Amino acid sequence: MNFSQLKCVILISALMMIGCQDRSNHLKSQTDTEEINNFKGEKIVKSEEEWRKELSDKEFYVLRQAGTERAFTGDLLNNKKEGVYVCRACALPLFSSETKYKSGTGWPSYYKPIDETHIGKTVDYKIGYARTEVHCARCGGHLGHVFNDGPEPTGLRYCINAVSLDFEPGNK
């Protein structure tokens, strides 16, 4: 091993150690993280069996088991009509077509919800680092995640599974 290779190994090892320390700090704080859910209306609570009867297998997997649909497969990805995107499980209005934009990620993306209280948030660590999961505040259905790399005016990208949404054409 030459000196350049040794420097690379040391640098990678140091970065991995920092990443592990960051992750352990995130994991420690995970127990302190409370779900953010300011929904003021009546919540919808159903058994797993009730949800299975109402949702398709794919919808159940995403909405109730926090799964993710494959990128570029959702029926609403390229929808350009005016209207409102609602929760597929309970029809709560979530996003307006006015805030939808093409992020290039393969999932419908929005820079803000219709009403902040309609979106609940939790931190998840499923892929090894902290991400903010978003879910329907009324029924708890998993929608996707929100990231800080979106357009102005919010700088947010709500990356949402199309299978979690229905579209109601008309007024935004």
Image (cartoon, helix red, strand yellow):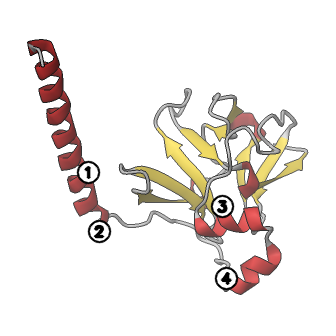
x%, y% of residue 40?
59, 70
Type of the residue with mark 1: Arg
Dot 2 and dot 1 residues touching (CB under 8 Å): no
Q: Quadrant of residue 12?
A: top left
Relative vertical location of residue 71 with respect to residue 155 in this rendering, above or below: below
Q: Residues within 10 Å of mark 1 (few under 14, many from 20)?
A: some
Q: Find numbered disc 3 in the image and state the secondary structure of the residue it sits on.
A: helix
Instruction: Give the CA separation, mark 2 to mark 1.
Output: 13 Å
Q: Nearer the viewer, residue 82 or 29?
A: 29
Q: Residue at x 45, y 63 (%)?
A: 36
Residue carrying label 3 = 62
Q: Position of residue 82 (x, y in %)?
A: 86, 38
Of the two numbered discs 4 and 3 on the same chain, state the one appearing first in sequence.
Answer: 4
- Quarter of image, res 26: bottom left
Tell me the residue that label 4 is attached to.
Answer: 48
Amino acid beneath label 4: Glu
Residue 68 appears left or right of 125 = right
Badge 4: residue crowd in 10 Å (few <14, some 14–19, many ≥20): few
Q: Is residue 32 left or right of residue 85?
A: left
Residue, far right: 170
Q: CA distance from mark 2 to mark 3?
A: 24 Å
Q: CA distance from mark 4 to mark 2?
A: 25 Å
Please name the amino acid that badge 2 sits on.
Thr
Residue 79: x, y in percent?
Answer: 83, 37
Which mark is in front, 2 or 3?
Answer: 3
Residue situated furthest front in the rendering: 1
Is disc 2 in contact with disc 3, using a CB cutoff of under 8 Å? Answer: no
SS of the residue at dot 2?
A: loop
> What residue does disc 2 label?
31
Task: Name the residue that disc number 1 marks.
Answer: 23
